[in-house]
Image: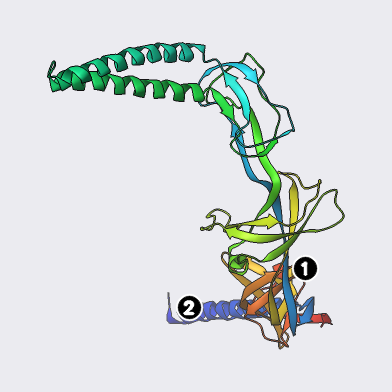
Amino acid sequence: MNFRHFISSITFIALLFLASCKHKKESENAGAKTAPAQQALTLEGLITSAQTVNASIEVPGTIIANESTEIHPEVSGRIVSLNVREGSFVSQGSLLAKLYDEDLKAQLKKLDVQLKIAEQTEQRQSELLKIQGISQQEYDLSLLQVHNLKADMDIVRTAIRKTEVRAPFSGKLGLKNISPGAYVTPASIITTISQVSQLKLEFTVPEKYGTQLKTGRMVTFSIDGAERKFSASVIATEDYVNESTRSLTIRALIKDKDPLLLPGAFAKVELTLEKGEDAIMIPNNAILPQGRSKFAFKYSGGKAEQVEITTGIRDSTNIQVISGLTPGDTVLTTGILYLRPGMDVKLTKVAQ
């Protein structure tokens, strides 16, 4: 290859390289001209303001009897007498059922005869001891026999009393689950009894409201089938918060008397809790939860600014913002799921 041919080859390669770079630059410029500019999202907003709100919530509750329990026999046996009139009121100590006890009574009679003989023996030996006719040990053994028989008789009497099923307190009987002649065990349920002369209301509230429901606090509730509302006074709160629901159980004493109030009935409990003087309320759908944090987007200079917020009380449509927003901020209320921090935003409607 001569020198002239070498120079020609180098020149040709250089021209190809320059042509390729020019074509690439023109392609990039063409692409930049054809790429559309990012369009601003058209959204709605709300100008926040301080307002006074009451934390009113409605929670489910249950009406319960002042006292309620199942009636079980203490021992196994056959029912020989049943005095359970369903739905009737009974006094404390009333006999509800009687189990077979003839064998126990026969055993008690036998022990009674043995006791009389042992007592006569003890009296004779007591007289002999006075004249030193017997030793002190012999007399002590006869006295011990008397005490043992009395103890055995007490055990049998207790067993006989266990064959009697009595009402533990005054109340209203439920439906009976057995019939006369049935063989029952301590696991058998004869009936139920409830003290309905005084009723209670049991409900749960979120743990953050637990400190506001002090003893003596009045609450109102309603039940299906009744047009009026009823009142109850808080008498006790549970001493721990349920770990799974993070709620606190409250029990209140119902002040009203009404035939419609029955144990087990569902109640809607209305609670008016704390009062916020300078509360910022925004729509529930303006909140974007992420893990354990909550965020909102506010309008700032034509762009969406994401802010972390702390929330408070809530109603059916709005939620209180405790921190993260100030009065006068414009909160974006639509298109929250499509927003990203720094996106261009155009407001079409701003509520106040």
> Which residue matches tag 2?
5
220 relative to 184, above or below: below
Do labels 1 and 2 touch, CB within 8 Å? no
Q: Residue furthest right?
A: 227
Residue receiving disc 1: 317
| Label 1 secondary element | loop
Q: State the residue lying farthest toward the front.
A: 131
293 left or right, relative to 254? left
Which of the two discs, 1 and 2, sits closer to the camera? 1
Q: Secondary structure at mark 2?
A: helix
| Tag 1: amino acid | Thr
Measuring from the top left, give residue 143's x and y in whole percent. 25, 22
Coloring scheme of the render? rainbow
User: Percent from the top left, x then y, of residue 311?
Assistant: 64, 73
Instruction: Give the quarter of the figure containing the C terminus.
Output: bottom right
Q: What residue appears at the point 49 percent right and 21 percent down from the top-left corner? A: 160
x 61%, y 23%: residue:
97
